[in-house]
């Protein structure tokens, strides 16, 4: 899949270089796209902070739009694909049911816009990285804060350089500050 400046995402055949489905459309430029772990659902996020979820189980079903989230700065599927975490520009993060789009946890409040988030491999924890430089680790079921790491980002946030990642057991969390 590609995200592009023409307000669409497209699927391509890697062997032939040909598009294989109609374009998935947004009203403005699509900035990024995220697959669930099984490759059955896709989240596309646009310049205005709208995230759209698509059911892509069949090659002929890319126009099956199944949910929308507003003011999104980042998003991720849980490892089992059953939940979606979204960070927003309004200093919050949410976890929602991937099927119904309804919240499954309380709002996770931050001191600035949430710019990256990641689930642990077991789906029990969610780490968030916000523009205030703090990394927070949340209980991904209840939405309660588990820990606040000291400022992990010392300079201004940079989408290309600041990252977080759990190890495979969810015991260690890596922060990278470019």
Image (cartoon, grey):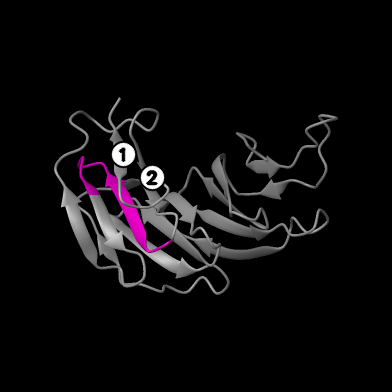
**Disc 1, SS:** strand
As displayed, is residue 119 above or below residue 130? below
Instruction: Judge depth for marks 1 and 2 and give the one in front.
Output: 2
Relative to the observer, which residue lies in front, 156 or 142? Answer: 142
What SS does tag 2 mark? Answer: loop
Q: Which residues are magenta?
A: 123-135
Determine contact: label 1, label 2, CB under 8 Å: yes
Q: Residue at coordinates 67% horizontally, 49% vertically from top-left? A: 25
Residue 167, labelled with which disc? 2
Image position, residue 94 (x, y; %): 37, 63
Query: Callout 1: few (<14), some (14-19), or many (20+) C-alpha neighbours within 10 Å?
Result: few
Query: Exactly how many numbered labels are in the figure?
Result: 2
Q: Quadrant of residue 56?
A: bottom right
**Of the residues under marks 1 and 2, which one precedes in the sequence?**
2
- Is residue 57 located in the magenta-colored stretch of the structure? no
* Quadrant in the picture for residue 81: bottom right
Q: Residue furthest left?
A: 150
Residue that mark 1 sits on: 174
Q: CA distance from mark 1 to mark 2?
A: 8 Å
Is 11 situated left or right of 142 in this image? right
């Amino acid at each position: 899949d590609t995200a592009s400046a023409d307000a669409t995402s497209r699927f391509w055949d890697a062997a032939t270089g040909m598009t294989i489905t109609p374009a998935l459309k947004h009203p403005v430029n699509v900035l990024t796209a995220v697959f669930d772990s099984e490759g059955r659902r896709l989240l596309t996020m646009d310049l205005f902070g709208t995230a759209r979820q698509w059911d892509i189980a069949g090659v002929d079903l890319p126009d099956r739009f199944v949910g929308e989230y507003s003011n999104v700065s980042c998003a991720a599927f849980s490892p089992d694909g059953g939940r979606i975490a979204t960070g927003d520009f309004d200093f919050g993060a949410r976890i929602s049911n991937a099927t119904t789009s309804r919240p499954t946890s309380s709002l996770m409040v931050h001191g600035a816009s949430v710019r990256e988030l990641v689930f642990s491999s077991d789906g029990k924890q969610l780490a968030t990285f916000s523009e205030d430089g703090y990394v927070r680790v949340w209980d991904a079921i209840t939405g309660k804060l588990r820990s606040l790491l000291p400022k992990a980002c010392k300079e201004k946030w940079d989408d290309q350089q600041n990252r977080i990642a759990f190890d495979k057991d969810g015991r260690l969390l890596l922060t990278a500050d470019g």
